[in-house]
Image (cartoon, rainbow, N blue to C red):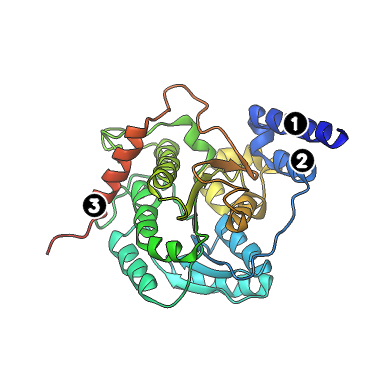
Amino acid sequence: MVAMIKGRAADLVDEALDFGVVPGFSAIGYRIRKRLFDWEADPLEGRSVMVTGANAGIGKAISIELGRRGAEVHMVCRNADRGEAARLEIALESGLEPELHICDLSSISSVREFGTAFVSGDASLDVLINNAGVMPPERRKTDEGFELTFATNVLGPFLLTELLLPKLRQSGSGRVVLMSSGGMYTSGFDLDDPELDRRDYDPPKFYAQSKRAEVMLADEWQDREPEGGPVFCSMHPGWARTQGVSDALPGFNRVMNPILRTGAEGGETAVWLSGATPEEAPGGEFYMDRRPRSRHRVPGTRESAEDRRRLYELCRALTAPSPD
């Protein structure tokens, strides 16, 4: 009975933090929840985990912690020099040597080349953490003609996941994690204008729409995957102190800096998800601090099952190989 009362009290504190947004999303919420629920750092020996955007910020912190827990880490980075520097740092911090792969998530051709080569190789893969993301200061198009935020945050991860599904299915305990953002709460997804070409460029709004898309795609994949296949989920890292945040949102970073999470705190749930069982962390959920959270807080942002299906089909069409 005492344990039940304590458990319910912890749940009530957690719910209050989540409702309050600022305490819940900041380091305050993370540190209170960690103590309330007595999180353990479970070992990950034998797990092979791929992390995109692994050379900086939350991605690097995730890679370090994965290595510390014994996982085989595959780093996916865009820049070879920065990737190698991060690889050496991660190896020093974790005690395990990660493997570095070079791939530009904004480039459909680069993703296809990398994903195809990885699937044809001998390496196993248990977990894919789609962490890489951008919020460019001005509207930019990729060489393939896509808006950069949409290409990097939506199309690249979509294609990489689709290409790596054979490896993840072979695992027997595969999992895909899409790193979304609290910004997605402010946005739905405009299927009639997916790259927001008809709107003036607004970095946070474009970013928020791309992060809403990631949540939608995770849910759609989970609905499509047969029972026993990989588990798909999305997550919110909370408000973390990273170079990406300080560059993209200097005002927010300046005001909130004292209570921002570290990269390791922002990435902790992704590490936990890498080893969690389907019973501990079911697919088709949106997680923050090891617990499923609501996907919607703002009116007008809710999508339907048909919207998710249309987004999936759109991404598949846009990333399809060019006809010969």
Question: Can you tell which mark lies on residue 13?
Answer: 1
At mark 1, the secondary structure is helix
* Gap in angstroms between the C-alphas marked 1 and 2: 9 Å
Q: Earlier in the sequence, mark 3 or mark 2?
A: 2
Q: Residue at position x 51%, y 46% from top?
A: 283
In the image, is 117 to the left or to the right of 23? left
From the image, tell me which residue sits under label 2: 32
Instruction: Looking at the picture, tell me which residue is in the foreground, 140 or 39.
Output: 39
Residue found at the far top of this picture: 299
Q: Amino acid at mark 3?
A: Gly
For the C terminus, the quadrant is: bottom left
Q: Residue at position x 39%, y 54% from top?
A: 157
Q: Residues within 10 Å of mark 3 (few under 14, many from 20)?
A: few
In the image, is 122 to the left or to the right of 311? right
In the image, is 39 to the left or to the right of 152? right
Instruction: Looking at the picture, tell me which residue is in the foreground, 77 or 159.
Output: 159
* Gap in angstroms between the C-alphas marked 3 and 2: 45 Å
Q: Residue at position x 37%, y 59% from top?
A: 160
Against 205, is 35 above or below?
Answer: below
Against 293, is 246 above or below?
Answer: below
Q: Amino acid at mark 2?
A: Ile
**Nearest-to-viewer mark from 1 and 2:** 1
Residue found at the far right of this picture: 2
Residue 284, given in percent of the width and then of the height, sits at 49, 42
Q: Residue at position x 65%, y 63% from top?
A: 65
From the image, tell me which residue sits under label 3: 145
User: Cβ–Cβ below 8 Å for labels 1 and 2?
Assistant: yes
Instruction: Looking at the picture, tell me which residue is in the foreground, 301 or 134.
Output: 301
Q: Residues within 10 Å of mark 1 (few under 14, many from 20)?
A: some
User: Cβ–Cβ below 8 Å for labels 3 and 2?
Assistant: no
Residue 8, given in percent of the width and then of the height, sits at 77, 31
Q: Amino acid at mark 1?
A: Val
